[in-house]
Amino acid sequence: MYQYEDKELWERIRRISDRKAYDVLYLRYFAVLVGYGELFVSHHEAEDIVQKVLLVLWEKRSELRIRGTLSSYLFIATRNSCLDQLKHVAVRERAMSDLRLSVIDNAADWNSYQFEELMSLLQRSLSDLPEEQRVCFEMNRLQCKTYREIARELGISEKTVEYRISQVLKKLQVDLADYLPLLPILVTYWTFRWK
């Protein structure tokens, strides 16, 4: 099987769904394509992208028509997927930047007395929480730690972290019901203030 050229492997994959031919092709190209993908994105992202490119090759084998060489197709598909990933990240970062600007603009418009009153209510509500819930919430919202990082640090499961944070959010919805439209802005501002 290893002596087959790409064209022969692709024909076996396309015509008779030869899994062994696909495995040979996968092993032949995976590391090379990941290395190429790293020119655009991180190693981890490149691995994910290449796995998807090779999976699509298998899943769409009967309908996929490759013009030129298989290696050209794989490199172009990898490059295009990496560029799409970069665009996606850029759009997400732009949206977060716009949100931060909105938070700053809205916070500037608030009456300082109203804002201090709301901050006081938030801090009072958080201080009334059981310590394990408050700690999880503050680690997530103030220290920007993921559920996995919190779980590892506290020696608990991610599900427990998720549950504790959801309980805090439910309590805040009740305690700060009059301020619900402003709550996301307040929590974001509060997070920036503590960084």
Image (spheres, rainbow, N blue to C red):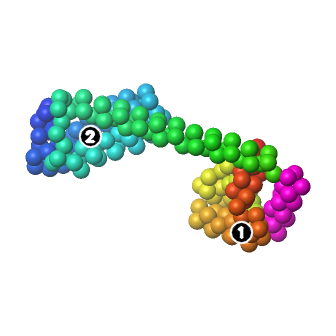
Is any part of residue 91 visible from this angle?
yes
Disc number lying in front (2 or 1): 1
Along the horizontal axis of the image, is 123 left or right of 88? right
Residue most toward the bottom? 174
Residue most toward the right? 113
Q: Residues within 10 Å of mark 1 (few under 14, many from 20)?
A: some
Q: Main secondary structure of the magenta part?
A: helix
Q: Which residue is mark 1?
A: 173
Amino acid type, mark 2: Tyr
Q: Position of residue 167 (x, y in %)?
A: 68, 69
Residue interval drawn in magenta = 111-130
The quarter of the displayed image where residue 192 is located: top right
Q: Quadrant of the C terminus?
A: top right
Q: How far is disc 2 from disc 1 in space, using C-alphas?
A: 51 Å
Q: In the structure shown, which secondary structural element does the residue marked by tag 2 occupy?
A: helix
* Towards the viewer: 9 or 79: 79
Residue sitting at x 52%, y 40%: 91
Q: In the structure shown, which secondary structural element does the residue marked by tag 1 occupy?
A: helix
Magenta-colored stretch includes residue 113: yes
Q: Residues within 10 Å of mark 2 (few under 14, many from 20)?
A: some
Residue sitting at x 16%, y 39%: 65
Q: Quadrant of the N terminus?
A: top left
Q: Which residue is mark 2?
A: 26
Q: Position of residue 39 (x, y in %)?
A: 43, 27
* Towards the viewer: 111 or 162: 111
Residue sitting at x 69%, y 70%: 170
Amino acid type, mark 1: Gln
Q: Is 21 drawn above or below residue 157 in the view shown?
A: above
